[in-house]
Image (cartoon, rainbow, N blue to C red):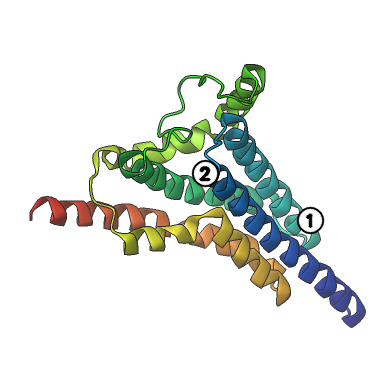
Amino acid sequence: RDFCLSRGLGDVYKRQAFFLILKSILDAADGELARMKNTPSYTGRYFDSVADIILNFLFLLSICMVTDGSFIYMLLAFIGIQLQGTLYNYYYVILRNKFDGDTTSRVFETQTPTAMKGEKQTHVNILFWMYNFLYKIFDQTIYLLDPKAIEASYFPKWFMVMVSAFGLGFQLLIMGVLLVFNFDYLIIPFFIAYSFLIPVFILLRRILEKKNYGK
């Protein structure tokens, strides 16, 4: 890249990084506000997930095109990001269902839920179908990798903090940092390599559960 082009892309990347981080903040604030006001909804729950997976795909596709990268590697990075996020959500939802009493997030999304007050059943039906179409393969893959997690009773805080590195907010933060420093070409290979932590976290969870069970 020549200097001017590189500098121009650098400015664009900084703006992109800002909006990625802003998106994460607003996304977290939206969910927290719903919980504080005690107004959860299946519409919001499924819409957030559908929007996230589309965002991930389009973002990686744009990076692939800008860097003249391989479409196959882009797909591998996309699959990796989704499996990472699914593992985090899998453990997090199990934990919330056991101790928080959360009702909108379910470990197994097998049946269309009944719409809550203030939302339309039609919207829930459509978004539920979209969610299952886009996420089912990732949910089933993670479940097959760690089926006994559903029965687990021990998820120490420090472990969940570690696994939160697979959360979408942290993933977007990593992307933003790489963009700010013009390391756009590292984003796709980074998330492919990052996926190798999935079996590490699963193995660590199993070890922790066995040690806790033996006490």
User: Is residue 140 rendered to the left or right of residue 68?
Assistant: left
Above or below, 33 relative to 204: above
Label 1 CA crowd tier, 10 Å (few <14, some 14–19, many 20+): few
Secondary structure state at the residue bearing disc 2: helix
User: Is residue 32 rendered to the left or right of residue 212?
Assistant: right
Above or below, 12 relative to 95: below
Total marks in image: 2
Q: Amino acid at mark 1?
A: Met
At a point 63% along the width and 27% down the height, the residue shown is 127
Image quarter of the C terminus: bottom left
Q: Position of residue 143 (x, y in %)?
A: 37, 37
3D distance between C-alphas at marks 1 and 2: 39 Å
Q: Quadrant of residue 161?
A: bottom left
Q: Amino acid at mark 2?
A: Arg
Depth check, mark 1 against mark 2: the one in front is: 2
Label 2 CA crowd tier, 10 Å (few <14, some 14–19, many 20+): few
Q: Nearer the viewer, residue 13 or 194?
A: 13
Q: Position of residue 176 (x, y in %)?
A: 67, 67
Q: Residue lying furthest right in this view?
A: 4
- Residue under circle 1? 65
Q: Position of residue 10 (x, y in %)?
A: 81, 74
- Residue under circle 2? 35
